[in-house]
Amino acid sequence: MVDESLVDALRTASRVVAFSGAGMSTESGVPDFRSPGGIWTRYDPREFTFDRYVDSADVRARSWQMRREFFDAAPQPNPAHDALVTLERDGRLAGVITQNIDGLHQQAGSQYVVELHGTARDVQCIGWPSRPGEPAGCGWQGKTEWAFDQVDLGVDDPTCPVCGGLVKSATISFGQMLDRSVMEAATELVEESDLLLTVGSSLQVYPAAGLPELAVQAGSRVAIINDEPTGMDHLADVVVRARAAEVLPDAVAAATSQTG
């Protein structure tokens, strides 16, 4: 299925920035927080705030259980992830900004990915005690499998091997502040783009939802691919109401085959 307006937008752009949301990951089998059978039907999201994580060893133990469920599902990149890699190799994609924490863009081969909400693939020291809403650890980071190995060895509440501080998934939890440098990197990408390609985001959660507004202010065009209406559709030059994996690969193939 080829959407000609999307093909034209991609073909005439020289510096595309992709912005992906949960809809892109659900097409790889990653359940979002709201979907039936999703993670939050088995875990209470109100328990997983940053401050509760710091305060409760039980919350930390349930958090590792939740993370293991996510990893056991072993989601894989889908054709929409692959299409962005193709666009990057064609020299048109400057980078990817994502709200997702699954690392699927990097697994597909994307070289420059700004992860607004962190990554579930790593863990980090957040110190003890930690400042409200903000990690204050020693700087140690490791792979999430390290924490799973600790739990398998009988350590219910893994601590930092360097300083003994609390260890947490390197994701942004409810009540945790976004990393300012990450948001600055995303802003810089958008301001230097000539097309913001928004994929699979409901564009409801700020500050990420404000990126299309920022693109328009910077003089960039906006294309939105989502299977439901978004609150930013009125700003877009192109709106495609579909799943990304159904339309993006063909559009990228058509746009890149006519270059050179």
Image (cartoon, grey):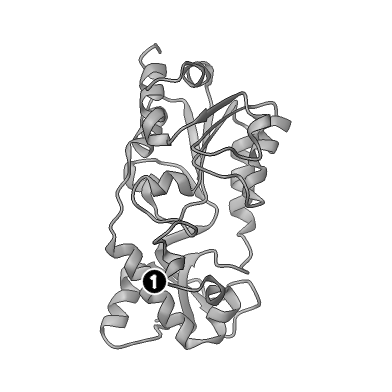
Residue 232 position within the rendered picture, expressed as x and y whole percent measured from the top left: 65, 37
Residue 117 position within the rendered picture, expressed as x and y whole percent measured from the top left: 53, 57
**Location of residue 196 by image quarter:** top right
Whether residue 24 is visible to the viewer of this picture, yes or no, is: yes
- Tell me which residue sits at (73%, 32%) in the image: 217
Tell me: 204 left or right of 15: right
Residue 27 position within the rendered picture, expressed as x and y whole percent measured from the top left: 37, 45
Q: Is residue 27 above or below residue 248?
A: below
**Location of residue 82 by image quarter:** top left
Q: Which residue is mark 1?
A: 66
Q: Is residue 165 above or below residue 100?
A: below
- Tell me which residue sits at (66%, 40%) in the image: 231
Q: Is residue 228 above or below residue 257?
A: below
Residue 193 position within the rendered picture, expressed as x and y whole percent measured from the top left: 59, 30
Q: Secondary structure at mark 1?
A: helix
Q: Is residue 155 above or below residue 187?
A: below
- Tell me which residue sits at (53%, 74%) in the image: 48
In-front residue for pair 45/124: 45
Whether residue 160 is visible to the viewer of this picture, yes or no, is: no
- Tell me which residue sits at (40%, 64%) in the image: 122
In-front residue for pair 136/58: 58
Furthest toward the front, the residue is: 36
